[in-house]
Image (cartoon, rainbow, N blue to C red):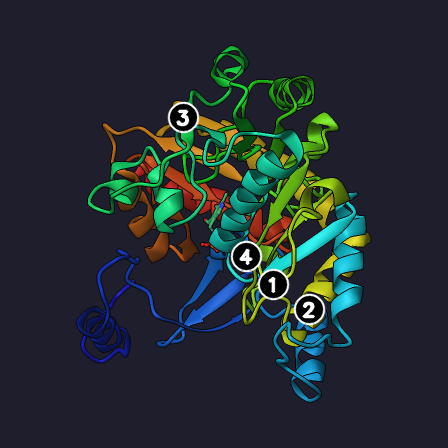
Amino acid sequence: MIIDDLTLTPKALADAERWTAHNYHPLPVVIAEAEGAWVTDVDGRRYLDCLAGYSALNFGHRHPALIAAAHAQLDRLTLTSRAFVHDQFAAFCKGLAELCGQDLVLPMNTGAEAVETAIKVSRAWGYRVKGVGTGRAHIIVADGNFHGRTTTIVSFSTDADARNDFGPYTPGFTVVPYGDLAAMAAAITEDTVAVLIEPIQGEAGVLVPPPGYLRGVRALCTERNVLFVADEIQSGLGRTGATFACDHEDVRPDLVLLGKALGGGIVPVSAVAGRRDVLGVLRPGEHGSTFGGNPLACAVATEVVHLLATGEFQRRSATLGARLHAGLTGLIGKGVITVRGRGLWAGVDIDPALMTGRRACELLLEQGVLVKDTHGSTIRIAPPLTVTEDDIDFALGRLAAVLSSP
Ligand SMILES: Cc1ncc(COP(=O)(O)O)c(C=O)c1O
């Protein structure tokens, strides 16, 4: 890729750098348009999007059915607040509750808000249903977690960059090793109200827990009267080859947290879905959001639920994911050390002797593939579920080329 002064990219990058806080370190590409799995930059170069907005674009960029739903709703009604009921609300909540096999849905906007909602609901359930003493509620989380960026959520992060210098921290959380059922069992006390985990840890590098772990967490939570809260914000909605990552172990959590792809890559939509005896503890005035469950969000998210109800995207993720993982496994020993993941979701550890994860991403960018690094030497591959076999082969070919001539 040649970026010179005659192209639009350098100025657009410099302007972004000049006028924004530096809380991100983006790759040097300025995207102007996109369709399906492909994006085009301001200079007309095309790239295969193998990050898909950290799984917010499971259905690709500008999926026609989602764009049509958004357009139609933009022309009718966009916001009411929850002071009133609007005509898109019930259909969305019903559709999502049924997709999740749950009774009730509480819509919010960002993933972090869904997590915060679940923390509040779990604590309220602890005091009002379980009978935990006031102010004593306690939640178990996993080492390496990523649940968002609010002050409470970073309080139980184990990532120094996410947490350091943002205290004082919210108490009431215990961190246990991910995948370790015995440690979780030992950490549960009579004040424990919930276990909050990602069924697959995305930001940690697409870490898949040992087989039986999710079933074990479910059994433990049931046995000890603790809520199982599954953060499926990144793992859910088709990404792993099933509707939810918990489906792989036939597990139904007490609360499931969704976000990212729920908004179809168009609007921020998140939600908590749960049983009536859990989510039903909230009373009017105790929780809310001006934009949560707005008509535009509901119209788009209802269409997302329809797309998932066909099962097509889950099947594509499973089939194309097998192709992706077979190709990546073939690169082990050729610059790749380990490959993890499920469906169209992979964490690939690059040999640090060869290059960093960041360098691999920069070289892939030059080759027309967008991916993002995490934790030094891992790259995450998570293309839209609409990619083709040729797209997968293209990405694999580019990765092989980058690793063979660093
Ligand atoms: C598992 C998980 N939970 C929560 C979040 C936070 O979502 P948001 O960035 O929309 O607040 C993320 C974002 O990456 C995530 O991966």
> Mark 1 belongs to which amino acid?
Gly
> Mark 4 belongs to which amino acid?
Ala
Query: Would residue 372 be found to the left or right of residue 251 on screen?
Result: left
Q: Nearer the viewer, residue 154 or 251?
A: 154
Secondary structure at badge 3 equals strand
Determine the residue positioned at 45% across, 28% down: 142
Q: CA distance from mark 4 to mark 3?
A: 27 Å
Dot placed on the residue nearer the N-terminal end, 4 or 1:
4
Q: CA distance from mark 2 to mark 1?
A: 9 Å
Query: Would residue 138 be found to the left or right of residue 27 on screen?
Result: right
Q: Which residue is mark 4?
A: 56
Query: Would residue 10 be found to the left or right of residue 260 on screen?
Result: left
Dot placed on the residue nearer the N-terminal end, 2 or 4:
4
Q: Which residue is mark 2?
A: 298
Asked whether disc 4 touches disc 3, contact meaning CB atoms under 8 Å apart, the reply is: no
Q: Nearer the viewer, residue 136 or 322?
A: 136
Q: Which residue is mark 1?
A: 263
Which quadrant of the rendered structure holds the N terminus? bottom left
> Mark 3 belongs to which amino acid?
Val
Q: Nearer the viewer, residue 294 or 69?
A: 294
